[in-house]
Amino acid sequence: MKNTKYVFVTGGVTSSLGKGIIAASLAKLLQERGYSVTIQKLDPYINIDPGTLNPYEHGECYVTDDGAETDLDLGHYERFLNIPTSQANNVTTGRIYQSVIDKERKGAFLGKTVQVIPHITNEIKERIQILGKTGDYDVVITEIGGTVGDIESLPYVESVRQLLWELGDKNAIVVHLTLIPFLAAAGELKTKPTQHSVKMLMQSGVNPDILVCRSEHEISDSIKRKLALFCNVKKEDVISSLDADTIYDVPNLMFDEGLDKVVLDKLDLCDNDQPKLVEWNHFLSKHKNPKNKVKIGLIGKYVELHDAYKSISEAFIHAGAANEVKVKIVWIHSEDLTLENVPQKLKNLDGILVAPGFGNRGTEGKVDAVRFAREHQIPFLGICLGMQMAVIEYARNVLNIEGAGSLEMDETCKNPVINLMEDQKDITEMGGTMRLGAWDCQITEDSKVFNAYKRTLISERHRHRYEFNNQYLKNLEGSGMKITGTNPKTGLVEIVELENHPWFVAVQYHPEYKSTVLNPHPLFVDFIKASLDFSTQK
């Protein structure tokens, strides 16, 4: 049984400093040294999971193989470490309280008054240690969402305080990420916000072991000495984290700063072979030195917040590097598209992706975009709702099925080529009730997707309630649109393609969730290759 070590990553001064990227970068460096590492995210909000949250507010909802709807940071963890996460890797306050209340209703507390301490904190500590107790990991990194001082974060900070005491020296440490702002008027970096942040953390009984300081400017030795003195850490424990060109630079930057070495020392772990990051830097080299470029139109309804499509944009980076191509994403709001203006808005694109989404808003614009891609032979990839829009467009404009549509958009739809899944018809609760997680798909060999995957059985992650209505299968057969992927158990249509088109693929699942730095998703790689071919032939 491994003696699992724990690293807690907290944040101060302001949100959105990049705790997830720092956690993932540290994990990558430890992984490169031969240690088995996983990362989990503790989210202070009271929602059970991000599944019912508005993408405008929270960004993308990431889905794991085992069907957990999670924070988008788990996507970063998988993309950096190249290993899957699970239900245990994301915990919310809602899930904590729900579990404690369920136990109280069953009499598990023997009539005692249920309180934040010890009952809520005990539940948090139990969730933190679930991954460590499997014996699979040398190090578990736990990122605590929010900012130190937030009311909702207090139970998590208290749980960390207790665990630091219970686990003992050399078994658990705290990495505190803060901001060192630059005041242009004064012409200098200011350490006071970090001092106050650390003071607030220490008032909760937690002393940071390492400070990671985000800044736009170089942090001098004198500033590091000042921070060390006033924040009760050693100078070598003050790590500079300057703004990077890409998040994929951060592991190298943290290695140069010695973050992994300091962590190993504090956890009493052997300083194994130096991280070489050979494959990682090979990817970075291709990413930063492209030989060509392509313009891909991303048609979505949440494009004002790019994080709503985070996994897709990152999958384009991975696939671009694999093809030695710079992928420029053109963000296009589907509500702005009409049949009249589509030629003008989409004319200079090398490829078109119609993105996932829910609800009726902006769907007609997606249908018009699909039609333009089909009629002008532009490489096309449809994902989830994008696949459904592709089927609707084809049914309307090629098969001439009057009133073809989706019951999600119109309950009185005359010809619902997209229908509510049978097992969804009696469900009334919205959260966690969709078709979620990894499902198998059988691929036909004579297809573009087979050329991409190079195998006939794949497993991909899903998040949807509606599906292709198999009553319309006969209408498609022999019409030019092929069903090239189905679920072997349910017969659910997973993939459609067009025969007389250079590259037109639409999938019911979410391939973007499984794209990583070291394993770019084959469908994205093939799509970008087709887009490059199209760009050179224009």
Image (cartoon, helix red, strand yellow):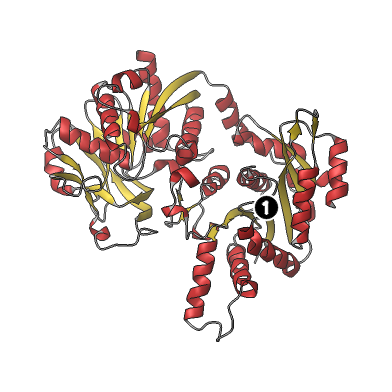
Q: Quadrant of residue 433?
A: bottom left
Q: Residues within 10 Å of mark 1 (few under 14, many from 20)?
A: many
From the viewer's perspective, tell me whether residue 149 is left or right of residue 82. right
- Residue 11, percent from left and from top: 68, 49
State the image coordinates of residue 93 (x, y, percent, origin top left).
Answer: 55, 62
- Tag 1: amino acid: Val
Residue with the most extreme bottom position: 110
232 vs 397: above or below: below
Q: Is residue 234 visible?
A: no
Classify mark 1: helix, strand or loop: strand
Residue at the limit of the structure toward the top, as seen here: 538
Q: Is residue 303 above or below residue 107?
A: above
Seen at 47% across and 81% down, the residue is: 106
Q: Quadrant of the C terminus?
A: top left
Q: Choose between 113 and 261: the one closer to the eye.
A: 113
Residue 362 picture location, percent across and down: 31, 36
Hey, which quadrant is residue 281 in on the image? top right
Q: Is residue 156 above or below residue 71?
A: below
Residue identifier under label 1: 9
Compared across the picture, whether 180 is left or right of 42 comes to: right
Which residue occupies the foreground of this view, 508 or 13?
Answer: 13
At which x and y percent is residue 226?
A: 87, 43
